[in-house]
Image (cartoon, rainbow, N blue to C red):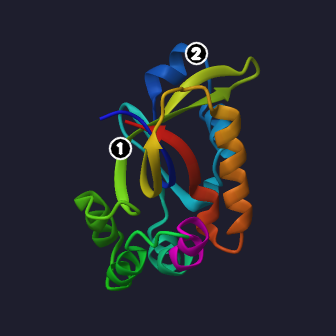
Amino acid sequence: MGQFLCIGIVTKMGISKDEINKNNLTLDDINKAVARKHVLSLYNRTETENYFEWEIDHSILLQELPSFLSYFYPYYYINNPAGYNEVISDIKKCNTNAEIIEIANKKQYECFQMDDMGRFTICAGKHNIGLYLQYESIIIALQGKIFMECYNTMFSFFSKTIQHLVKDFKLAGAISVYITG
């Protein structure tokens, strides 16, 4: 399949407790590291036996997504609307986050599909220990195959630029640019 450059709304993140413990880190260390990538107040943290997870607040996604996409898509898809009007129309009919995620899981639209293959590196603790944070996101923009994997600085720049562009939406804090595949 290959790897593709994506812009996505991170809907869920998680990290293994074993990973935290073996590096002598605390949940506070992890929260600070995650907060450097995303606005934590957009997410609800849950804990299982083996993981800490952050999931996007359902009310924010449900309330803001149609307006957010109506604002974002015309800037990104200047020459090719990629069916985004149909996506927005479908999302407006949703009454729950589960319905939105179901549309994304169908992968019916290039500009709106679920991606559960993501991970990014966070640096945590006083020694900036590098850890992988797994995440799921809704891809809202997808571009060609990627042949190099060393774009972290550029991706951070793109993410922050997009977040600034749509800063009036709470969902801006959940945007990430990444490679998937």
Label 1 and label 2: CA atoms lie apart by: 25 Å
Query: Would residue 126 appear left or right of 92 to someone viewing this image?
Result: right
The circle drawn on residue 141 is: none
Callout 1: SS: strand
Residue behind mark 1: 116
The three-letter code of the residue at mark 1 reads: Asp
Position of the N terminus by quadrant: top left
Tell me which amino acid carries mark 2.
Answer: Asn
Q: 10 Å neighbourhood of mark 1: few (<14), some, or many (≥20)?
A: some
At which x and y percent is residue 168? 70, 74
Q: Are marks 1 and 2 in contact (CB under 8 Å)?
A: no
Q: Is residue 141 magenta?
A: no
Give whichever of 22, 110 is nearer the camera.
110
Residue at the location (58% across, 61% down)?
Answer: 42
> Could you tell me which residue is drawn at 67 percent across and 36 percent down?
33
Q: Is residue 71 magenta?
A: yes
Q: Above or below — where is 14 with respect to 23? A: below
Check the image and name the residue furthest to the left. 106
Residue 13 can be seen in this image? no
Q: Residue at x 43, y 55 (%)?
A: 139
Q: Is residue 157 above or below residue 59?
A: above
Q: Is residue 11 left or right of residue 49?
A: right
Circle 2 residues within 10 Å: few <14, some 14–19, many ≥20: some
Q: Residue at x 58, y 71 (%)?
A: 72
Magenta-highlighted residues: 69-78
Q: Quadrant of the C terminus?
A: top left
Q: Disc 2 designates what residue? A: 23
Label whose residue precedes the other's in the sequence (1 or 2): 2
